[in-house]
Image: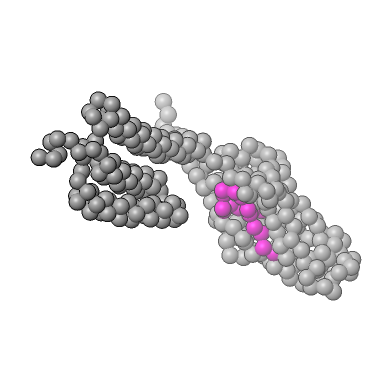
Amino acid sequence: MLSRNSRFLILGLIALLLIAPALAMPGGPPWKSGDNLTVEVGCTCHGDGAASSEVVVSISGVPRAYTLDQSYQFTISLQHASNAEGGFMLWDYNLGALTPGEGSQSVAEEPGALSQSASGNDWVVTWTAPSSDVGIIPFQLVGNAVNGNGNFDAGDAWNIVSFSISPPDTATNDNDENLALRTISVGDYESLFVAVEDPEAIEAERQEKLSHQFFDEGNIYYFFTLSIIIVAAVIQGEFYERKFGGGPEHLDKSLAIPQGVRRGVLSAILLVGFAWAVDNEKSWEILLSVGMLTLWAFFGVYRTIVQARAPAQAKDLV
């Protein structure tokens, strides 16, 4: 049987194991990744475990050659097509002095290195050159752009860049302030403009376009078919009236003339309206409606003329 103290000890160890992942990275990556330094091999617990060109890691304000005891401000930036923030780690192998700025901190296991203190971007840190010539100073910078879901998964992307600063008086353009400082980057800039789209969102957008297309085309086919049927019915009515009905009824000129004038004016107005709709590229609904009304008005003029020319029958003379 376990004593009460033993049971409490076991429970305490289990609790520590459970909360360890939450406490392992309160701000900044761990100094080591297995047996290797994170700043040298990268954030292997993120992404697919390898560096990705999809994230562009940049550091600006870097001198080509350092001046003894001079301080420089570096700006560290991350760029990714969808991940806007993340973290970093920077180290100069303790050959100079790195000072954290807002949003950054010294690494606990190696105070000479810097990392982020919270997820962010565009960190400004200070690097002070050594007081004596120590030769070429190498730097290691790793940047990790995260997707913000709190997990170490394939949605994160990191990249790593190695660079160096030459000893004093070795750069040929130190007198030109614009060329003395440089920006060093690693990554594929084209990937910043090619965000991976959600397949479900793409399919939903395609289905929506199809539904609008079917609605619009269905209405067009329906109303144009209806218009053709109406026109065909009128033509058929004219044909049967002439062949089997003895032709149109006679209309006296005293009635035909004012009726023809009214219908002619209406036809002219509708024709002008149709021409205006075409010239202003109105929708097919407006064009079809005005066009059908114009045809109806012209047909009215035609019927007036035909009836006025029809011979008078006996019933018309009573």
Q: Does the magenta segment cover residue 87?
A: yes
Viewer-side residue, 260 vs 279: 260
Q: Does the magenta segment cover residue 85?
A: yes
The residue located at (65%, 46%) in the rendering is 191
Q: Magenta stretch?
A: 74-89
Viewer-side residue, 262 vs 209: 262
Vertical side of 312 occupied by 70: above or below: below
The residue located at (59%, 58%) in the rendering is 121
Q: Is residue 97 left or right of residue 291?
A: right
Where in the figure is residue 129, as x and y percent of width and height? 78, 67
Name the quarter where the C terminus is drawn: top left
The residue located at (77%, 67%) in the rendering is 181
Q: Main secondary structure of the magenta part?
A: strand
Vertical side of 317 occupied by 130: above or below: below
Where in the figure is residue 9, as x and y percent of width and height? 46, 37
Q: Is residue 67 left or right of residue 143?
A: right
Name the quarter where the N terminus is drawn: top left
Q: Is residue 287 left or right of residue 72?
A: left
